[in-house]
């Protein structure tokens, strides 16, 4: 027992749990719409809404639809929308040049959203996997994922996104040295206010499966991403990676996946006090939705509880496919 605590029966913890009013008064953590970053999947075409089978409730959206979605998100109080493209397989190459094409799907979507819904912040993904014939986040040569050559490509990709008007760049590739290289290139190109939310502690996880279906990368990918994404057994390494990315100029950092790595979220926030985000990834979303669809859990309650856990662990916000659903609930 904590020394300042009177012994039972003088202290009865249930006194403050007795009514909703007392529980509200003593609640330590809150979840608000301002904590949400909404990841959305883009596809080509017009008036397209393609359901993603492994992510019930999630659809790939064509540009007209994503602009409408951004307006709806803004109206719900969601501050950030994060874009992930489903790339036509014919555009995937080993050299990945579609990644820095100013007219690629993501860059067109950034411009369309910023033109129509300037209030919402647009975040992007900086990694080569949607454009790579090999399905990896980096360039591949003789089965090796090249680091420095990939960083050069990522810098071109980041500049194209900043040029299109992205507010926040999200390097999710886990190459070494990419934050410093991107920050320097952004400064030199006059994009001094483009923020970087580094996927600093990103683990080689089985929970990304449904996402790879959503962006059409599952087919191309052979093997795993263990030579660049982190070993799920490691914690000190996450701290060293966050320290490195902050020192290279990251404005915010991310831990990914979310719920299996809450200990990492707490450690990162406690150690650095920097803006810290968790990504509740596709597999986490799919598990909750699947169990709810089977009537095995209350989906709405599980959604709120899972998101509150990130706030309790110290995160400033969460990337979640539940963003519109939970925002509607919080607004009600
Ligand atoms: C790839 C990327 C991935 C996710 C975001 N960016 C997948 C991967 O690393 O294989 C996963 C997101 C999710 O599962 O929801 N650059």
Image: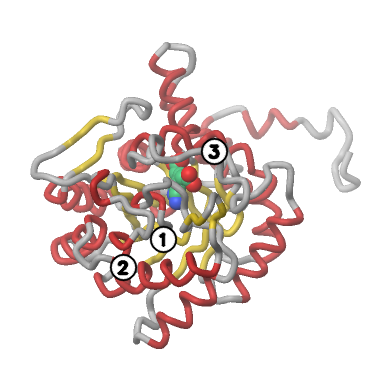
CB atoms of marks 3 and 2 within 8 Å? no
- Other-residue count near label 3 (Cα within 10 Å), few / some / many at <14 / 14–19 / ≥20: few
Which numbered disc, 3 or 1, marks the residue that appears first in the sequence? 1
The residue under label 1 is 126
Left or right, residue 2 beside residue 189: right
Q: CA distance from mark 2 to mark 1?
A: 9 Å
Cα–Cα gap, marks 3 and 1: 21 Å
Residue closest to the eye, 141 or 36? 141
Q: How many marks?
A: 3
Does the Cβ of the disc 3 residue fall within 8 Å of ligand 1? no
The percent position of residue 91, horizontal first and vertical second, equals 25, 51
Q: Earlier in the sequence, mark 3 or mark 2?
A: 2
Report whether residue 78 is seen: no
Spatial separation of the CA atoms under disc 3 and disc 2: 29 Å
Q: Secondary structure at mark 2?
A: helix
The secondary structure type at the circle numbered 3 is: loop
| Residue position marked by numbered label 3 in the rendering | 223
Numbered disc 1: secondary structure: strand
Q: Residue 2 at what x, y percent from top left?
A: 87, 44
Q: Quadrant of residue 206?
A: top right
Side (left or right) of 123 relative to 297: left
Indicate which disc, 2 or 1, sits on the residue closer to the N terminus: 1
Name of the residue lying farthest toward the left: 46
Q: Are there few (<14), some (14-19), or many (20+) residues within 10 Å of tag 1?
A: many
Residue 161: image tag = 2
Closer to viewer: mark 3 or mark 2: 3
Q: Residue furthest top?
A: 295
Label 1 CB-ligand 1 distance < 8 A: no
Q: Nearer the viewer, mark 3 or mark 1?
A: 3
Residue at the image point whose x is 64% and y is 43% from the top? 262
**Residue at image coords 26%, 57%:** 106
């Amino acid at each position: 027992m904590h020394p300042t605590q009177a012994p039972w029966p003088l202290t009865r913890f249930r006194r403050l749990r007795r009514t909703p009013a007392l529980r509200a008064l003593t609640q330590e953590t809150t979840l608000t719409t301002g904590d949400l970053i909404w990841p959305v999947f883009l596809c080509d075409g017009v008036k397209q809404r393609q359901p993603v089978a492994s992510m019930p409730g999630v659809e790939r959206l064509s540009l007209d639809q994503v602009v409408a979605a951004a307006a709806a998100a803004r109206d719900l109080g969601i501050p950030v929308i994060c874009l992930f493209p489903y790339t036509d397989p014919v555009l995937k190459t080993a050299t990945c040049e579609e990644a820095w094409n100013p007219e690629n799907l993501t860059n067109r979507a950034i411009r369309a959203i910023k033109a129509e819904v300037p209030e919402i912040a647009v975040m992007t993904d900086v990694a080569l996997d949607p454009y790579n014939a090999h399905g990896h986040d980096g360039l591949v040569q003789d089965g090796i994922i090249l680091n420095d050559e990939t960083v050069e490509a990522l810098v071109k990709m980041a500049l194209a996104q900043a040029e299109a008007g992205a507010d926040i760049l999200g390097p999710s590739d886990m190459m070494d040295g990419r934050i410093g290289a991107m920050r320097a290139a952004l400064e030199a190109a006059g994009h001094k206010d483009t923020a970087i939310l580094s996927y600093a502690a990103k683990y080689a996880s089985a929970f990304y499966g449904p996402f790879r279906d959503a962006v059409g990368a599952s087919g191309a990918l052979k093997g795993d991403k263990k030579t660049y994404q982190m070993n799920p057994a490691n914690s000190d390494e996450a701290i060293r990676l966050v320290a490195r990315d902050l020192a290279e100029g990251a404005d915010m950092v991310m831990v990914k996946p979310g719920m299996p790595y809450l200990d990492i979220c707490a450690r990162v926030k406690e150690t650095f006090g920097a803006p810290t985000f968790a990504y509740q990834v596709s597999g986490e979303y799919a598990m909750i939705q699947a169990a709810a669809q089977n009537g095995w859990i209350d989906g709405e309650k599980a959604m709120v509880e899972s998101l509150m856990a990130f706030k309790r662990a110290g995160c400033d916000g969460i990337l979640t496919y539940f963003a519109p659903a939970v925002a509607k609930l919080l607004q009600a």
